[in-house]
Amino acid sequence: MKPDLSLSLQFADPRHRALLPRHKVQRFIRAALELPGEIAVRIVGAEEGRALNRDYRGKDYATNVLTFDYAHDQVVGADLVICAEVVEREAAEMGIPLLDHYAHMLVHGTLHAQGYDHEADDEAEAMEARESEILAALGIVDPYRRR
């Protein structure tokens, strides 16, 4: 049985609202959750994505997903900010369905919210393996084999 999830879903950039109904977003996040979660997902445009990345990470560009994790002991508490323009561009560049890439970003962000990281090579390998396993269970092709 998958852990409970309290989800807030916000569309500051509404371009993919129809592609991301609440039940699909919940399914992708719950697949990656190891504990109950209280997670907010905000789909943003490039301007907001760039400002958040600059202000919180010191990187002056919009990135695909930002994870702001607040707790990961008893309950996973986090905000996931996904930049619609970046995800759309990356999916087109990789020649993959847009929904598959959103699923990957939601899984990736949820794993970050639980303490997974990819700064060191061994951490990256472990996180990528976990992402691949979760995405396979969702019926999504391994994003790391596409490279």
Image (cartoon, helix red, strand yellow):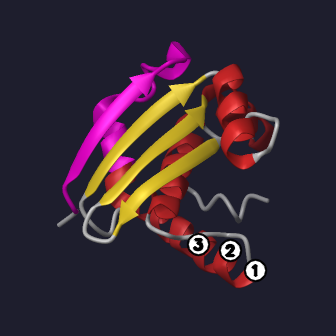
Q: Magenta span has 15?
A: yes
Q: Which residue lies at the image location 24% right of the left edge and 50% below the top edge?
A: 5
In the picture of the structure, the residue carrying the numbered disc 3 is 127
In the picture of the structure, the residue carrying the numbered disc 1 is 121
Of 49 and 96, nearer the camera is: 49
Q: Which residue lies at the image location 44% right of the left edge and 44% below the top edge?
A: 79
Amino acid type at circle 1 is Asp
Residue at the outermost top position: 14
Q: Of helix, strand and loop, which one carries label 1?
A: helix
**Contact, mark 2 vs mark 3 (Cβ under 8 Å):** yes
Which of the two labelled residues, at mark 1 and mark 3, occupies the earlier sequence position?
1
Residue 81 in percent (x, y) is at 54, 38
Q: Which residues are magenta?
A: 3-28
CA separation in Å, label 1 and label 3 = 10 Å
Q: Of helix, strand and loop, which one carries label 2?
A: helix
CA separation in Å, label 1 and label 2 = 5 Å
**Contact, mark 1 vs mark 2 (Cβ under 8 Å):** yes
Amino acid type at circle 2 is Ala
